[in-house]
Image (tube, rainbow, N blue to C red):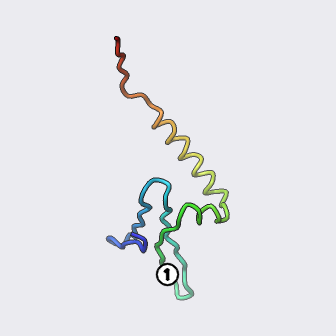
Amino acid sequence: MPEGQLVNDTYIVQAGEFNKNVGIVEIDVLENDEFEILPKLITKEEGMLLEEDEDVVEAIEVINAEFDYITGLVLLGIQIYF
């Protein structure tokens, strides 16, 4: 979905395989208080060239810590004896 899709007043951008693309929705407020909305995909490499926003970096660090905790949980352990 490189150009995004509008569903019930919500734009959806699909990144595809994990870490392959980044879905972006750019929203510009025009002089007449209308919006120009541009959903698109960029590659991971293009994203690495963007300027970092410190607030976004901090939010990502929090999300990553939560993700690491969740994915590190052991839900079931089975001992196998030979």
Number of other residues with Cα within 10 Å of mark 1, as a class: few under 14, some 14 to 19, many 20 or more: few
Residue 5 appears left or right of 68: left
Looking at the rendered image, the quarter that the N terminus falls into is bottom left
Q: List x then y, in percent, for residue 29.
A: 54, 80
Residue 23 position, x and y percent, is 48, 64
Using the image as rendered, state which of residue 42 and residue 52 is in the foreground: 42
Query: What is the quadrant of residue 44 in the picture?
Result: bottom right
Q: Nearer the viewer, residue 29 or 73?
A: 73
Q: Which residue is mark 1?
A: 36
At x 32%, y 71%, the residue is 8
Which amino acid type is shown beneath numbered disc 1?
Glu
Q: Is residue 54 left or right of residue 29?
A: right
On the image, the x and y values in percent for residue 74 come to 42, 28
Question: On screen, 61 above or below 3?
Answer: above
The quadrant where residue 45 appears: bottom right
| Total residue callouts | 1
Q: Residue furthest bottom?
A: 32
Q: Can you say whether 70 is above or below 53 in the image?
A: above
In the image, residue 73 lies at what x, y percent?
Answer: 44, 31
Asked if 15 appears above or below 18 in the picture, the reply is below
Question: Residue 13's quadrant in the figure?
Answer: bottom left
Q: Residue at x 52, y 73 (%)?
A: 26
Could you tell me which residue is drawn at 49 percent across and 81 percent down?
Answer: 36
Instruction: Reply above or below: 60 against 16.
Output: above
Secondary structure at badge 1 equals strand
What residue is shown at x 49% (from left), y 84% (from top)? 34
Residue 18 is left or right of residue 46, and the answer is left
Outermost residue to the left: 8
